[in-house]
Amino acid sequence: MRTATEYHDLTSYRRDRMSGHYMDLGNQPDVFKRYPGIEPIPLPGDAELPTPRLSSLLRKGDRPGSPTHLGIDDLSRIFILAYSLTARAGHGSGDFFFRNAASAGALYPTEMYASACGIEGLEDGLYHFSIADQGLSPLRKGTAKPARSPALTFYLTAIFFRSAWKYRDRSYRYHLLDTGHVIENLTLALKAMNLPFSLAYDFDDKTVNAFLGLDEVREATLAVCRMPGGIVADDPGLPGSFGNLPDNCTAASRVSARETAYPPILDIHDAGARILPAKGTPADMAAELGIDPENRDPIDARRRWPETMTCPEALSQRRSSRNFIPQPISGDAAAAFMHGLCIEDSTPSEPVAGLRHCLGTGLLVGGVDGMAPGLYLLDPASLSSGLAVAGLFMDRMADICLNQGWLKNAGVHVLFMANLALIDRYWGARGYRYAMLNAGRLGQRLYLQATAMGLGCCGIGALYDEEAADLLGLNPTSRLLYLVGIGGVKGKI
Ligand SMILES: Cc1cc2nc3c(=O)[nH]c(=O)nc-3n(C[C@H](O)[C@H](O)[C@H](O)COP(=O)(O)O)c2cc1C
C-alpha cells in the first residue's frame, strides 16, 4: 500500500461496505498538546490586528522584502490569525472550543511550531504553539545560524490518532485536508502582516520531525512555511546536527491512554517520505480528469467581491453551516468563489506542485443567479470556467455524501478532484500530500470567502468515493477528494 491510488482506494467508502463503528468515548484524544514540566510563555493577547479584506490579500501580487523589525506582538498576531480558538460550546465534561480553521469531526489533528530568530521580546529558539494558552512552549534555545533580519519558520504537523480515533484508516485524508485549512490561514496571516514567505511540502521528514522532537509514529510534519533567513531543520547549510529533545517532549505526541496505530496511515505517510526528482512540468490537472467542457467563459478578475467584512473578522466568525435554504446565491458571489479558487500564491511554493498541477477544481451549480445548473470545470491557467454537463445534480450528490440531505439546498458544491495515477507517476506517494493539502487550503479559502459574503459553508469529506466519480463522469483513475458546499443560510440572506 505505497501509492496514492492504493491508499485512496483502500479508504474509500462504499454503500454496501459501511460498518458501524464503535467510538471509545472514554479514550477520546486530547485536542491540546501538552508538555509536562514546560510552562507556555503567554503571547500578548491585545495585539491590534490588520484589517485587509480577503480579496485584496489574495489578489496582492507584490512580494514584500524582509522586515527590519519584528516583535512578539507581531508573532501573536500571526498566531491569532492562523490558528486560534473561537466559539465555545458547553459539553457535559466541560467547555469545548471550536477553532478558526475547520476540521473533520472537530478533532483538530494539526499542531503548529515556530522557530524564531531576532524577534524582539522573545529569545531565539524553537517553540510549540499552545493554542489553549495562546502561548509558546520553549523546546530549544538559540539558533543554528545568525540571521541578518528577523525571521520565523513555521512547521505544521498532524497528530494521527486525533482523527484516527474516529475515522481510522481514512483519517490520513483528514490529517492532510485539515492541515491545509490551517496552512491557508497562516499564509493569509503572513500576507496580512506584509511578510515574505515560502511554503514547502518537500523537506527531509526524518530530520524535521527530529528537530521538532516528534514521536514519528504518532505525529508528523506536513508543511514548512518560512520567511527568508528562517531556518529549516534539513537545511544543508546548518552546521553540525542538533541533539535529540528529551523523552518528555517526544512523549507529548501521545494524546490518549490507549492509542491504536493504523498501518495504512503509517504506510502511505512513510511511502511519501521519498521526494522524487522532478519529471518536468505536469499538465494542469483539470485536463486530466476526463471532464471536457465544450466552451469556456472568462472569469472576470476585476469583478468586485461582495464582502461585508475584513479577513480577520471572517477568520474569527468562520463556522460550518448546514442550514442551507433553497435560494440561489448571487452571480457576483459565485464569480468571487471561482476567481478565488484560481489564485495561486505569488510567493514561490517550493514543490513543483502548484495548486493547479495537482488539483482540478469544479463546481456543481444548483442555484446561482445567471448560471445554468450543471457541472462546471475551472481552468485556472486561462482564468475561465466551462459547463461540462448541464443538469441538476445536487440531490444525487447529497445522497452520495453519505445521505447528508441538507447539502441539496446548497447553491454550489465546489469539487476538488485529482487523477491519482498521474499523481503517483509524477510525485509518487508524496504527491498525495500535495493534492490533499492544497485541497484543504482552497477549502479554507472558500469558508472565509463565504463568511465574508454572508453565506454558509461546509466542508464534506464523507462520501461514497466511486459513486461520486461516476456521477461526475471522471476517468477511471480520477477521484473527488473533497467537496465544499456553499449557499444561503437562514437568517443571513
Ligand atoms: C476535511 C473536512 C471534512 C469535513 N467533513 C464533513 C462532513 O462530511 N459533514 C459535515 O457535516 N461536516 C464536515 N466537516 C465540517 C466539520 O465537522 C467542522 O469543521 C467541525 O465540526 C468544526 O466546526 P466549525 O467548522 O463550525 O468550526 C468537515 C470539515 C473538514 C475540514
Image: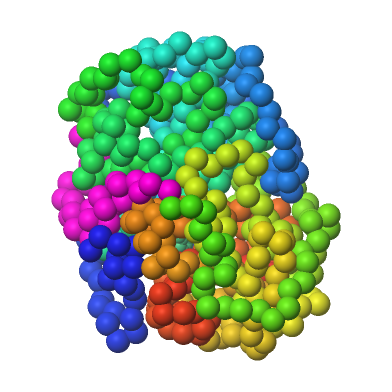
Q: Position of residue 478 (x, y in %)?
A: 44, 73
Rendered residue at 72%/66% (across/down)? 384
Rendered residue at 43%/53% (across/down)? 279
Q: Nearer the viewer, residue 457 or 54?
A: 54
For residue 285, above or below residue 202: below
Rendered residue at 23%/63% (across/down)? 1
Whether residue 487 is in magenta: the answer is no
Whether residue 265 is in magenta: the answer is yes
Q: Nearer the viewer, residue 252 or 468?
A: 468
Most distant residue in the right direction: 303
Q: Position of residue 377 (x, y in %)?
A: 63, 72
Q: Nearer the viewer, residue 24 or 178?
A: 178
For residue 421, above or below residue 104: below
Say if residue 410 shows up in the picture.
no
Q: Tell me the quarter of the picture where residue 227 sits.
A: top right
Report the span colored magenta.
251-278
Q: Position of residue 449 (x, y in %)?
A: 67, 55
Say if residue 77 shows up in the picture.
yes
Image quadrant occupied by the C terminus: bottom right
